[in-house]
Amino acid sequence: MSNIGIIIEERAADIGNFMVGRLLPFRQKRMVGPFSFIDHMGPAALNEYENLDVGPHPHIGLSTLTYLFEGAIMHRDSLGTEMEIKPGAVNWMTAGKGVTHSERTPEYLRHTDKFLHGLQIWVALPKELEECEPSFEHTNAEDLPHWEDDQGVNFRLIAGEAFGKKSPVSVYSKLYFIEIKSKNKAKVSIGKDLYGESGLYILSGTISDAGTTFESKQLLIAKDAQLCEFEIGEDTTIYIFGGEPFPEERYILWNFVSSSKERLEQAKQDWIDKKFPPVANETGYIPLPEFYLTKKTS
């Protein structure tokens, strides 16, 4: 019997001058553990006059996790951070009570052909930490736990705890974000190492479960993380993420996440009134989309 409860197809979404594939939230499954939002960026071939330019915008109540497969992004935020992220590294920004940041193609790549491909993720904060002080940290690729099993399957623990290992990324709840790659078909049985809720995203290749084959750009939500067992196909890369869900519901309004609808409305008004901290060496301002001007959190 299959352990797959929900199958989510990647959906196109426009984030300004760049199209992404949206995975979470989904109408039947708003969160997986503390993970509240996942976008698949690219793969995009950008020419010499095309660049990623996501200007200054705000967040509250969450941590952002940026993980690239190809390309580079320059992150700037209201904490004074200016950090370029490259493939395999992790940018982890905790918004807490409020932060502003931008994401752009680095200057040295802006007038040349380039590729961009990766994941943008939001992880909701525990209720008691939703109003914590903002922070930022960068973790190099070589500092993330990685290993190969006896079948030649490669694992990388990007964030959280699993397999008796711990990523150096400073998470705030019990979670995991795992990369699994294989050149050959292999049986993967990792249920005993997982906990809480679990999602499996197929970036490339295939996996098979109970006689059914699933392909790239599909997100599979497990009925039970403890029963996570499947066959990974040749030349396949997948990402498994999840963890313990929070006891309280989380609400999303634009770039804000909170357990309180009133707090989201306050954040919306604070952005309109330009009360969020500015980003140094940045110009521009992404206004609150018109859709949210009259929309109340539901």
Image (cartoon, rainbow, N blue to C red):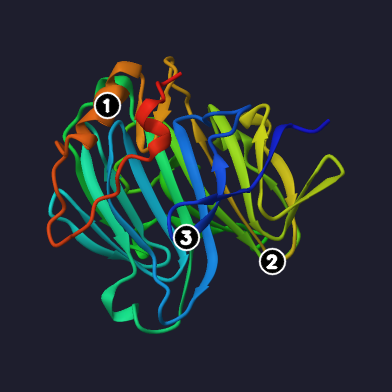
Secondary structure found at label 3? loop
Position of residue 280 in the picture relative to residue 76 (left or right): left
Q: Amino acid at mark 3?
A: Phe
Badge 2 is on which residue? 235
Look at the image and tell me in which quarter the N terminus lies. Answer: top right
Residue 260 appears in the rendering: no
Position of residue 283 in the picture relative to residue 196 (left or right): left
Residue found 63% across the figure and 27% down from its top: 28
For the residue pair 193 and 10, the one nearer the viewer reads as 10
Badge 3 is on which residue? 18
Give x and y (percent) for residue 120. Answer: 44, 51
Secondary structure found at label 1? loop
Q: Amino acid at mark 1?
A: Glu
Q: Quick one: label 1 or label 3, which is nearer the N terminus?
A: 3
> Which-is-in-front pick, marks 3 and 2?
3
Position of residue 14 in the picture relative to residue 150 (left or right): left
**171 lies above or below 215:** above
Mark drawn on residue 130: 1
> Which-is-in-front pick, marks 2 and 1?
1
**269 lies above or below 111:** above
- Cα–Cα span, label 1 and label 3: 29 Å
- Cα–Cα span, label 2 and label 1: 40 Å
> Which-is-in-front pick, marks 1 and 3?
3
